[in-house]
Amino acid sequence: MTWRNWLVKTLLCGVIAVLGGPALSQARQPEFVVYEVHQNLGLGGTAESAPPREYFVNLGLEHGVKVGDILEVSRRASTHDLVNQQFYRDLVYPIARVKVIHADSGVSVCRLEKFLPVESTVSVSPKAIMAGDLVRSVIKH
C-alpha cells in the first residue's frame, strides 16, 4: 500500500466516523465539550498565586447542571493500527474532574477539582484540560 493510499483510506475512515450514516446521527447523543479555557494574567509572584483556569462547557441549567456539580472531563484520541497502517478507532478516557462554579441556560463555567491519577487512567500529555475535551455530569450537588 502506498503512502498516498494509506492517507486517503485514513481520511475516509475519519470522515465516515465523524459524519456517520443517517441511522448513526439519529442514535447519537449530543456531545458536551470544553469549548474555551480562560486564565487571567498573573501579575508576577509564585505559581501558587497564579489565577485559576476557568473551563467553559456547553452543558448548563437546561441540561440539569447546577453550581457545585462535578463534571468528568475525558479526552478523545485517535488510535492507528501500525501493522495494517490504518485508522483503528477513537479511544475516549477520563482525565480530570471539574467543579461547576457558575451555570447558565446552555453553558457552565468550571474550575479544576482534580486530575485523575495515572494509576487509574491513560497518562495525558500535556497534563492539561484543553478545548475539545469531552464533558459529562457525574456528581450532582
Image (spheres, helix red, strand yellow):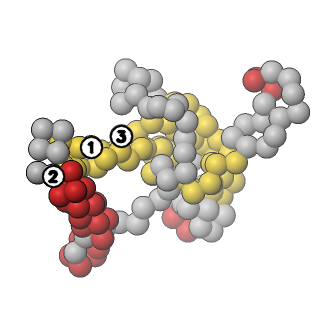
Q: Which residue is mark 3?
A: 93
On residue 125, the disc is none
Vertically, is 89 above or below 51?
Answer: below
Please tell me which residue lies in front, 93 or 70.
Answer: 93
Q: Amino acid at mark 3?
A: Tyr
Q: Earlier in the sequence, mark 1 or mark 2?
A: 2
| Secondary structure found at label 1 | strand
Res 3 seen here: yes
Vertically, is 39 above or below 9?
Answer: above
Q: Which residue is mark 1?
A: 79
Vertically, is 67 above or below 13?
Answer: above
- Residue 35, position in %: x, y? 57, 57
For label 3, the crowd category at 10 Å Cα-Cα, with few meaning under 14, some 14 to 19 and many 20 or more, is some
Q: Which residue is mark 2?
A: 2
Q: Amino acid at mark 2?
A: Thr
| Secondary structure found at label 2 | loop
| C-alpha distance separating marks 3 and 1 | 12 Å
For label 2, the crowd category at 10 Å Cα-Cα, with few meaning under 14, some 14 to 19 and many 20 or more, is few
